Amino acid sequence: MQQRPSQSGGDPRRERLRERLEAIRARSEKSASWNSSSQYLSRLINREGFVPITARLSRADLAFLSGARDEVLAFAELALRLVELHQPQDAGGITSDPDHPIQRCRACMWRWPCPTFRTIDESLGR
Protein backbone atom coordinates (compact mmCIF):
# COMPACT_ATOMS: atom_id res chain seq x y z
CA MET A 1 0.00 0.00 0.00
CA GLN A 2 1.32 3.42 -0.92
CA GLN A 3 1.33 5.85 2.01
CA ARG A 4 1.07 9.56 1.44
CA PRO A 5 2.48 12.08 3.89
CA SER A 6 -0.03 13.68 6.23
CA GLN A 7 -0.44 17.44 6.27
CA SER A 8 -0.18 18.24 9.97
CA GLY A 9 -2.00 21.35 11.04
CA GLY A 10 -4.28 21.18 7.98
CA ASP A 11 -8.03 21.24 7.66
CA PRO A 12 -9.54 18.63 10.04
CA ARG A 13 -12.24 17.76 7.45
CA ARG A 14 -9.53 17.03 4.89
CA GLU A 15 -7.65 14.87 7.38
CA ARG A 16 -10.84 12.97 8.29
CA LEU A 17 -11.59 12.30 4.61
CA ARG A 18 -8.00 11.27 3.93
CA GLU A 19 -8.11 8.81 6.84
CA ARG A 20 -11.40 7.34 5.61
CA LEU A 21 -10.08 6.95 2.07
CA GLU A 22 -6.87 5.35 3.32
CA ALA A 23 -8.93 2.89 5.42
CA ILE A 24 -11.09 1.99 2.42
CA ARG A 25 -7.99 1.46 0.29
CA ALA A 26 -6.36 -0.68 3.00
CA ARG A 27 -9.47 -2.90 3.32
CA SER A 28 -9.67 -3.22 -0.45
CA GLU A 29 -6.03 -4.22 -0.81
CA LYS A 30 -6.27 -6.84 1.98
CA SER A 31 -9.37 -8.54 0.59
CA ALA A 32 -9.31 -11.22 -2.09
CA SER A 33 -10.36 -10.48 -5.65
CA TRP A 34 -13.45 -12.31 -6.87
CA ASN A 35 -12.69 -11.85 -10.58
CA SER A 36 -11.70 -15.46 -11.30
CA SER A 37 -14.36 -16.90 -8.97
CA SER A 38 -17.17 -14.83 -10.49
CA GLN A 39 -16.77 -16.47 -13.91
CA TYR A 40 -17.11 -19.93 -12.36
CA LEU A 41 -19.93 -18.87 -10.02
CA SER A 42 -21.97 -17.28 -12.82
CA ARG A 43 -22.37 -20.75 -14.38
CA LEU A 44 -24.02 -21.98 -11.15
CA ILE A 45 -26.99 -19.58 -11.20
CA ASN A 46 -30.19 -21.53 -10.51
CA ARG A 47 -33.73 -20.93 -11.83
CA GLU A 48 -34.42 -18.44 -9.05
CA GLY A 49 -31.40 -16.39 -10.12
CA PHE A 50 -29.20 -17.30 -7.15
CA VAL A 51 -25.94 -19.16 -6.74
CA PRO A 52 -26.09 -21.61 -3.83
CA ILE A 53 -22.53 -21.50 -2.51
CA THR A 54 -20.52 -22.09 0.59
CA ALA A 55 -17.63 -19.67 0.79
CA ARG A 56 -14.59 -19.38 3.02
CA LEU A 57 -14.04 -15.71 3.72
CA SER A 58 -11.22 -14.16 5.71
CA ARG A 59 -11.73 -11.34 8.20
CA ALA A 60 -10.29 -8.95 5.62
CA ASP A 61 -12.81 -10.15 3.03
CA LEU A 62 -15.71 -9.67 5.44
CA ALA A 63 -14.49 -6.22 6.47
CA PHE A 64 -14.32 -5.21 2.82
CA LEU A 65 -17.65 -6.75 1.80
CA SER A 66 -19.56 -5.29 4.74
CA GLY A 67 -19.08 -1.73 3.48
CA ALA A 68 -18.33 -2.25 -0.21
CA ARG A 69 -21.77 -1.38 -1.59
CA ASP A 70 -22.07 1.88 0.34
CA GLU A 71 -18.47 2.84 -0.45
CA VAL A 72 -18.89 2.17 -4.18
CA LEU A 73 -22.07 4.26 -4.20
CA ALA A 74 -20.26 7.08 -2.40
CA PHE A 75 -17.35 6.97 -4.85
CA ALA A 76 -19.70 6.93 -7.84
CA GLU A 77 -21.55 9.96 -6.46
CA LEU A 78 -18.24 11.72 -5.82
CA ALA A 79 -17.01 11.04 -9.34
CA LEU A 80 -20.29 12.19 -10.90
CA ARG A 81 -20.25 15.41 -8.88
CA LEU A 82 -16.62 16.11 -9.81
CA VAL A 83 -17.29 15.44 -13.50
CA GLU A 84 -20.29 17.78 -13.32
CA LEU A 85 -18.23 20.44 -11.57
CA HIS A 86 -15.16 20.12 -13.84
CA GLN A 87 -16.45 20.54 -17.37
CA PRO A 88 -15.28 22.58 -20.34
CA GLN A 89 -16.41 26.05 -21.24
CA ASP A 90 -15.37 28.40 -23.99
CA ALA A 91 -12.39 30.42 -22.81
CA GLY A 92 -13.42 33.36 -24.94
CA GLY A 93 -10.98 35.48 -26.82
CA ILE A 94 -9.70 35.27 -30.38
CA THR A 95 -8.64 31.90 -31.77
CA SER A 96 -6.91 30.90 -34.97
CA ASP A 97 -9.11 27.80 -35.26
CA PRO A 98 -12.80 28.74 -34.87
CA ASP A 99 -13.84 25.06 -35.22
CA HIS A 100 -11.75 24.14 -32.13
CA PRO A 101 -11.82 27.09 -29.72
CA ILE A 102 -9.68 27.08 -26.61
CA GLN A 103 -11.61 25.74 -23.64
CA ARG A 104 -11.06 26.05 -19.90
CA CYS A 105 -12.50 24.16 -16.96
CA ARG A 106 -15.56 25.85 -15.53
CA ALA A 107 -14.45 25.15 -11.93
CA CYS A 108 -10.67 25.58 -11.81
CA MET A 109 -10.07 27.55 -15.04
CA TRP A 110 -7.19 25.27 -16.13
CA ARG A 111 -6.98 24.59 -19.83
CA TRP A 112 -9.33 21.76 -20.78
CA PRO A 113 -9.06 18.94 -19.93
CA CYS A 114 -8.11 20.08 -16.43
CA PRO A 115 -5.95 17.97 -14.07
CA THR A 116 -8.99 16.92 -12.01
CA PHE A 117 -10.90 15.63 -15.04
CA ARG A 118 -7.77 13.91 -16.43
CA THR A 119 -7.17 12.17 -13.10
CA ILE A 120 -10.76 10.89 -12.95
CA ASP A 121 -10.60 9.79 -16.58
CA GLU A 122 -7.29 7.97 -16.07
CA SER A 123 -8.44 6.29 -12.85
CA LEU A 124 -11.71 5.02 -14.28
CA GLY A 125 -10.23 4.18 -17.69
CA ARG A 126 -8.13 1.34 -16.27
Image: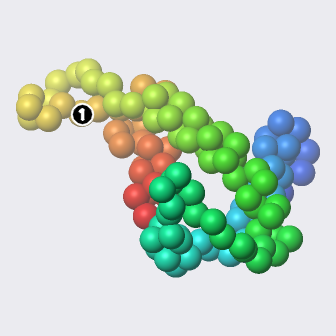
Q: Position of residue 78 (x, y in %)?
A: 59, 37
Q: Secondary structure at mark 1?
A: loop
The x and y percentages for residue 53 are 66, 70
Q: Is residue 115 visible?
A: no
Q: Residue pushed farthest top?
A: 92
Q: Residue furthest front?
A: 47
The x and y percentages for residue 14 are 79, 41
Q: How is the image coloured?
A: rainbow
Q: Is residue 2 left or right of residue 91?
A: right
Position of residue 11 in the picture relative to residue 93 (left or right)? right
Q: Residue at x 67, y 47 (%)?
A: 69
Q: Residue at x 91, y 45 (%)?
A: 9
Q: Nearer the viewer, residue 99 or 39?
A: 39
In this view, 29 is above or below 72: below
The answer to which image quadrant residue 3 occupies is bottom right
Residue found 70% across the figure and 53% down from its top:
68
Q: Is residue 70 above or below residue 57?
A: above
In percent of width and height, residue 34 lies at: 59, 72
Q: Is residue 17 left or right of residue 117?
A: right
- Can residue 103 be seen at all in this image of the molecule? yes
Q: Is 83 left or right of 76, judged from the image as shown?
A: left
Residue drawn at x 78%, y 54% is 66
Quarter holding the N terminus is bottom right
Disc 1 residue type?
Ile
Closest to the observer, 49 or 116: 49
Image quadrant containing the C terminus: bottom left
Residue holding disc 1: 102
| Mark 1 closeness class: few <14, some 14–19, many ≥20 residues within 10 Å | some
Count of numbered tags? 1
